[in-house]
Amino acid sequence: MTERESRRPLRLGVAGLGTVGAGVVRLLDQHRDRLGAALGRTIEVAAVSARDRRRNRGIDLSACRWFDDAVELACAPDIDVFVELIGGEEGVARRSVEAALTAGRPVITANKALLAHHGTALARLAESTGAALKFEAAIAGGIPIVKALRESLLGNQIRRLYGILNGTCNYILTAMGSDGRAFEDVLAEAQQLGYAEADPSFDIGGFDAAHKLALLTSIAFGTEVAFDDVYVEGIEKITAADIEAADELGYRIKLLGVALETESGIEQRVHPAMVAKTSAISGVGGVTNCVAVEGDYVGDMMLVGPGAGAGPTASSVISDVIDVVRGDRTPAFVTPADRLRPYERARMRAHEGGYYLRMSVFDRPGAFAAIATRMAGEEVSLSSIVQRPVSPLPSGAPAASSEGEAGAPTPVVLITHETTEDAIRRALAAIEADGHIDGQPQMIRIERL
Amino acid sequence: MTERESRRPLRLGVAGLGTVGAGVVRLLDQHRDRLGAALGRTIEVAAVSARDRRRNRGIDLSACRWFDDAVELACAPDIDVFVELIGGEEGVARRSVEAALTAGRPVITANKALLAHHGTALARLAESTGAALKFEAAIAGGIPIVKALRESLLGNQIRRLYGILNGTCNYILTAMGSDGRAFEDVLAEAQQLGYAEADPSFDIGGFDAAHKLALLTSIAFGTEVAFDDVYVEGIEKITAADIEAADELGYRIKLLGVALETESGIEQRVHPAMVAKTSAISGVGGVTNCVAVEGDYVGDMMLVGPGAGAGPTASSVISDVIDVVRGDRTPAFVTPADRLRPYERARMRAHEGGYYLRMSVFDRPGAFAAIATRMAGEEVSLSSIVQRPVSPLPSGAPAASSEGEAGAPTPVVLITHETTEDAIRRALAAIEADGHIDGQPQMIRIERL
């Protein structure tokens, strides 16, 4: 032990001192001795960089060198590891990471956007100089899914991987489910609570989840990072009526990221999905994230935990630091970058779980028959049809004529058996063209978990 | 890469060819190329040992040297890693592991009994010769909880750790809950299905879970392995009436292993516990295991997966092999063995969640008052009292007199607020001594999760 303990401290250069950066500084300050004893080497934040030097972050930076320029910090000769917590796929984040890797210096980052866009190239650069590139904190906050895939489950061929990868969306869907409120109301509340950004489109549009999914896909399936090929659909169109119908049918609606190997390549998709209430993932509520992995030997495994926040993200950054202290040299995506397979987008395939369809059908003779005929024409078979009564109008709204209007639309929910995405899309297009429905139909995939 | 790939294969010596040993051979056979490419080194089973050389295990052992004696295998000069899958805390398992470690050879084991009884001494031996001692497969089957604690969550001070660590018990309790059957019936079924041993006392008595808990405690809290100090209570006394009452009160009953830091030391306990149906752990059913960890930075994290079986356990063994290939040198319990704190058993402390008590009270004047007075005398306050009607007798059983018998016992369920274990035990002893109840009272801790 004496030899190990005599090693000089590992010096981190931390760029970006937002909540996560401050969390990392705080964690290392609080747990310095315990970590030093466990690792045989002290970890210290030797230098930092951020936009505003004067801002009070509630942390002691007196022992740290200050850099105005993160790129300069990344190349500073007296740091051992560059920790990038700036964020953003371009600009100083990208330049500083590239500078550190070019210099052969280990990089730890929480920057999912950067890796989703430039992951393969950065991994190649890292391997060319022998530098580690690590990113546990970029995916699902405190959940150690990167290490689980890179190390614990490496003995498995992964068949499918899926998860709740965005806390904002899960918070909104959970809240809509528990009290029947509309999407817009809950979103406004989430913004007030700090669970959603002022411009929430990146989260609720599914793009944040798609960034993370693209990275998980690369690790699990050995393919180049292919964020642009992820099929992405957000939760903006999910209504209280969908949530209610799902509940009655025994489902909850979650924004899922799903990656799986198919005969024609790797399927990557992010979209709202109906999951059975009896599934473990249906119980993951609020801002909590989870990732489930199906491996040929391990079977079904699920990791559940906080997907964001200063503490959980700092915990994951430190996990990467510990790997660097221990001399981990594994390629960023496990498979060496030069051997990652080019990503081949899977053909639109059979969707095992079937589909939930909700449409407003004009109440006139022949409308249902026309819809059923269009479904049959695409060989889509239906497992259930629910004609739902029109919800009572909120008090204060003008009452509809009690006789009803011939041809006024009635909400109808259809559940299909397994079919292909193509068939469903063709059937829905034909139904729309027939003119028997009001507005666009809602379509939500049912995920068999 | 050329240098790494030119490394000769890592040669495993596998002792014990039961389902897990055969699973390891099968996994390495199936995934040899993929693992070799990812690790830059091929892994091969070079030698094996088991009791019966002739038995057909459905695996190809033609390329493996055979040893009748596992100790000889452990010391064989042409293997790099000794994999002990024999089981048992003494005998050849212990002798072979000691022999390998003494020779400075890495040991991978799934043997929780061995480690629960001799873990600290074996860790010390391993560290004295510089050999790795790894045991991911010993705890919760395929769930990578050892690596999560040793590496991913090492930046955290762990506050509490708990889990469902025995699949047999969880299967029995889940089945009792879903169809109201008696413990004995479900146990018999579990034995038929192979989920319970012919002699099930080790599992249902809580000892298997206690083995695993003792190891987790050591890693999480840096204490010497102290299996003998785990408070252990099994599920034998849980009745259909308890399950039913729990359900009505919003709880499920699970056999939990719990370890937490208290003011007076580390509390380690395995016992049936009432967990709220709203908790994530309440949804972990059947033979599935889970481990939840509360860390000061990461917050609440839970890993859920298969707790046993050839595939999941082989997956964990291979995870350890991968660590050895990658040169992991971390001490067995993270903290070097010489610095593990002596285990100090915590004083009986306040139990935050309170208690569920069920007793058969003789229906006579003053009985309830006497019970309430005994509770009050120990300052135990009650949050609810449910006097339950006597369940209808199963058809075929002799009917009780319809007039009822003065003094015939009535089932009563009490839920207490937070109190100490001592106070509950004194109150129950006094109530028993008063003679107002029939038989022994049932007491189940309510766990606040």
Image (spheres, coloured by chain):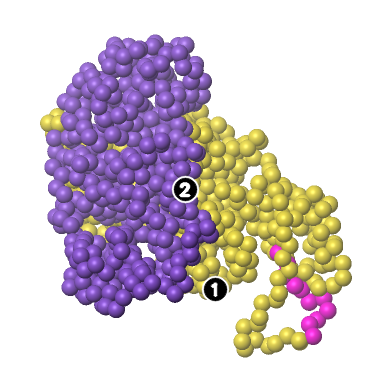
Chain colours: A yellow, B purple
Residue that badge 1 annotates: A181
Q: Chain of mark 2?
A: B
Percent from the top left, x then y, of residue A382?
75, 55
Q: Chain of mark 1?
A: A
Name the residue rendered at 66%, 80% in the picture: A392
Q: Are marks 2 and 1 in contact (CB under 8 Å)?
A: no
Mark carried by residue B356: none
In this view, the residue in front, B403 or B371, is B403
Which quadrant is home to the N terminus of chain A? Answer: top left
Name the residue rendered at 42%, 25% in the picture: B18
Is A443 positioned to the left or the right of A29 in the image? right
For numbered disc 2, what is the local secondary structure?
Answer: helix
Name the residue rendered at 32%, 21% in the picture: B81
In this view, the residue in front, A153 or B305, is B305
Crowding at mark 2 (Cα within 10 Å: few <14, some 14-19, many 20+): few
For numbered disc 1, what is the local secondary structure?
Answer: loop
Percent from the top left, x then y, of residue A270?
57, 52
Percent from the top left, x then y, of residue B80?
32, 18
Which residue sits furthest right?
A365
Report the magenta residues as a range: A403-413
The amino acid marked with disc number 1 is Arg
Mark carried by residue B185: 2
Name the residue rendered at 32%, 45% in the picture: B205
For the question of whether residue A367 can be seen, the reply is yes
In this view, the residue in front, A40 or B265, is B265
